[in-house]
């Protein structure tokens, strides 16, 4: 039967997704065909779960549409038929083969639409079963009738062949307005001008698959790569240059060829909107897959050149936003410990957004600029602290922040019970409502570069217990409307060092400040069991106070032997990973922070506490 993902691909193929573009006024494309009441009856049957009857009605409608030459209804019938056959348990391979058989004899444009759907179907099937397909051995002869024997190479041939058939003949498809699809076309009708022809629509569907970085198992030494600066050129130098390579099955080659063919068509358009949208998309694709070391500068130079050709066109704002996105990405190279290189890239991106908004305030480019500007100026924070600190002694926390010139901090008692959820907005609201043990605020350094910075802040000493350190950009700690972050903290004068030997766990309890061993400490070992589907805590061992500096505990579980709770020896930390240790100075039991989630053990369904 059709796999769920494949069925989704087929159903979605009746809707042409179009992107927002860069014109201020849009002309709606009127459907050439009204909704067919026959589909309402079929939809009602499907909603009732009567898929067999719906399939019969669809088959009748398919035959009628084929006889009358109604290619729109026939195409929709093929898509709905595939959906209902999936529910009936028909193999997806049979459906894809029937689509191919009809596409080979169907008229234009039905044949191209079916080929496009068929290509996407084979690609989805390959993606779902990739881990199986890659295990197959290349044979001298492969049966075309049995996809269960197809290797990766054979699947790629099928996908490329179907997509190639979907965009040929190019000249004929380029003369068919996309509005001819009528009710098959969904989305913002005001943005159809960015895919003005059926060729544009089908070519972009193919590129959407070719953009995947699928690596062939056997790459030829002469494989096609995007290693030529010419691929960043604009207008005639790119569109008219012959594109040939012996590795024509490479996905990068297929995508670049389609970009070139579409740009060649739109060079002579009366309006430049479709061309600008196409070129910016192609430049982003080439930059993503290019192997040249100077690809960043080539990408920026191409965008700058494109903008200079649009001084009086609304597309200037969209191109400006693309340049702003380039600078925003470049800001990721900034290293605050390595000078000022790339430091002001985010600020430059905001300036470009402001210019796009000011010049064409009602354009789609201005709308995208506002969204990008808001993201760049959004406040962000992250707070970190030690897992455990000594009692009544000042300690430091680390605060990383961006666009947060002032921050308010609190320390509250940890309200969460053991095993209780300690994340999400609900927990944040709960923490913000608690009475603070400490509260203060501080003005942070801000030089206006919009980058992340880090400071260490002192916190006054605390008595024994479990706490949460909160940081917010709101004095009222409004966790819903403002950023709020927190970290958990344990205050204890003890630490523990662990050493593992076979199924034994040896503990050495130390004073957190002096590092001296502490005798007379009780330790209890627990594990958490999920094998029954429920959280269950099980005590494995207990160590009573003795006049010695260390204890040895057996850690063999009921479902297998633990190989160790943590492979890292932690000095100065009392982890909850393996023990709960009672301090004679503290009441009740005190234990450390959350356990190691990377702890290896052999007992299935178990992890250390």
Image (cartoon, rainbow, N blue to C red):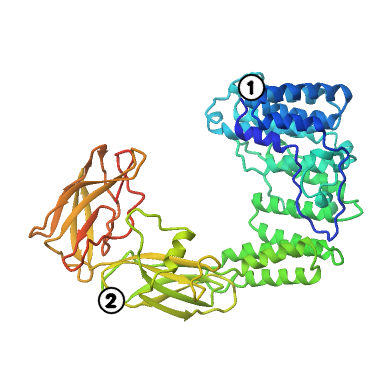
* Residue topped by disc 2: 393
**Label ID, residue 90:** 1
Q: Residues within 10 Å of mark 1 (few under 14, many from 20)?
A: some
Query: Is any part of residue 218 visible from this angle?
Result: no
The single residue placed furthest to the left in the displayed view is 547
Query: Is any part of residue 192 visible from this angle?
Result: yes
On screen, 541 above or below 365?
above
Residue 556 in the image, given as x and y percentages of width and height: 21, 41
> Which quadrant of the view contains residue 347?
bottom right
Q: Nearer the viewer, residue 77 or 444?
A: 77
Residue 285 in the image, given as x and y percentages of width and height: 69, 50
Residue 477 in the image, given as x and y percentages of width and height: 48, 71
On screen, 248 above or below 414?
above
> In front of the other: label 1 or label 2?
1
Residue 311 in the image, given as x and y percentages of width and height: 85, 67
- How many marks the image carries: the answer is 2
Q: Is residue 494 left or right of residue 13?
A: left
**Label ID, residue 518:** none
Name the quadrant of the N terminus.
top right
On screen, 448 above or below 273?
below
Residue under the image location 87 percent in, 51 percent down: 267
Q: Is residue 572 left or right of residue 211?
A: left
Residue under the image location 58 percent in, 33 percent down: 128
Q: Nearer the viewer, residue 317 or 210?
A: 317
> Which quadrant of the view contains residue 126?
top right
């Amino acid at each position: 039967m059709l796999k769920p993902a494949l069925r989704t691909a087929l159903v979605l193929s009746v809707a042409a997704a179009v992107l927002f573009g860069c014109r201020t006024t849009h002309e709606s494309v009127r459907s050439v065909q009204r909704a067919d009441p026959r589909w309402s009856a079929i939809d009602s049957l499907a909603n009732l779960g009567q898929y067999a009857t719906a399939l019969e009605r669809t088959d009748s409608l398919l035959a009628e549409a084929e006889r009358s030459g109604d290619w729109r209804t026939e195409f929709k019938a093929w898509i709905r038929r595939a959906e209902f056959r999936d529910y009936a348990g028909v193999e997806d391979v049979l459906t894809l083969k029937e689509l191919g058989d009809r596409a080979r004899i169907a008229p234009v444009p039905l044949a191209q639409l079916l080929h496009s759907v068929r290509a996407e179907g084979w690609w989805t099937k390959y993606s779902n079963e990739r881990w199986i397909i890659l295990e197959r051995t290349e044979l001298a002869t492969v049966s075309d009738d049995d996809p269960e024997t197809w290797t990766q190479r054979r699947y790629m041939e099928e996908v490329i062949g179907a997509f190639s058939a979907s965009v040929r003949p190019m000249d004929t498809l380029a003369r068919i307005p996309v509005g001819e699809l009528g009710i098959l076309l969904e989305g913002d009708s005001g943005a159809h001008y960015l895919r003005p022809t059926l060729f544009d629509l089908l070519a972009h569907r193919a590129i959407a698959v070719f953009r995947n970085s699928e690596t062939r198992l056997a790459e030829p030494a002469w494989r096609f790569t995007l290693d030529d600066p010419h691929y960043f050129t604009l207008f005639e130098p790119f569109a008219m240059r012959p594109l040939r390579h012996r590795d024509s099955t490479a996905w990068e080659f297929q995508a670049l060829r389609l970009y070139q063919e579409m740009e060649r068509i739109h060079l002579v358009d009366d309006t430049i909107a479709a061309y600008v949208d196409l070129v910016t998309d192609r430049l982003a694709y080439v930059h993503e897959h290019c192997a040249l070391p100077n690809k960043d500068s080539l990408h920026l130079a191409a965008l700058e050149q494109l903008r200079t050709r649009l001084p009086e066109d609304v597309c200037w704002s969209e191109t400006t936003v693309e340049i702003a996105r380039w600078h925003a990405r470049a800001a990721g190279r900034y290293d605050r410990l390595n000078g000022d290189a790339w430091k002001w890239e985010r600020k430059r991106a905001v300036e470009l957004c402001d210019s796009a908004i000011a010049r064409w305030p009602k354009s789609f480019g201005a709308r995208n600029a506002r969204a990008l500007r808001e993201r760049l100026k959004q406040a962000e924070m992250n707070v970190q602290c030690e897992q455990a600190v000594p009692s009544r002694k000042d300690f430091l926390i680390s605060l990383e922040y961006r666009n947060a010139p002032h921050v308010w901090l609190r320390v509250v008692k940890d309200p969460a019970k053991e095993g209780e959820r300690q994340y999400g907005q609900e927990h944040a609201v709960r923490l913000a409502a608690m009475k603070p043990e400490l509260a203060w605020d501080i003005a942070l350094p801000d030089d206006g570069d919009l980058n992340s910075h880090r400071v260490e802040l002192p916190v006054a000493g605390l008595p024994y217990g479990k706490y949460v350190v909160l940081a917010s950009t709101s004095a009222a700690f409004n966790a819903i409307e403002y950023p709020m972050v927190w970290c958990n903290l344990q205050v204890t004068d003890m630490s523990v060092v662990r050493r593992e030997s076979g199924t034994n766990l040896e503990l050495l309890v130390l004073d957190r400040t002096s590092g001296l061993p502490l005798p007379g400490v009780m330790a209890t070992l627990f594990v958490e069991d999920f094998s029954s589907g429920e959280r269950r805590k099980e005590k494995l061992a207990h160590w009573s106070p003795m006049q010695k500096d260390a204890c040895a505990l057996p850690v063999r579980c009921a479902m297998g032997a633990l190989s160790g709770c943590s492979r890292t020896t932690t000095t100065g930390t009392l982890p909850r990973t393996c023990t709960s240790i009672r301090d004679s100075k503290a009441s009740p039991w005190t234990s450390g922070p959350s356990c190691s989630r990377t702890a290896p053990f052999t007992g299935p369904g178990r992890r250390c506490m």
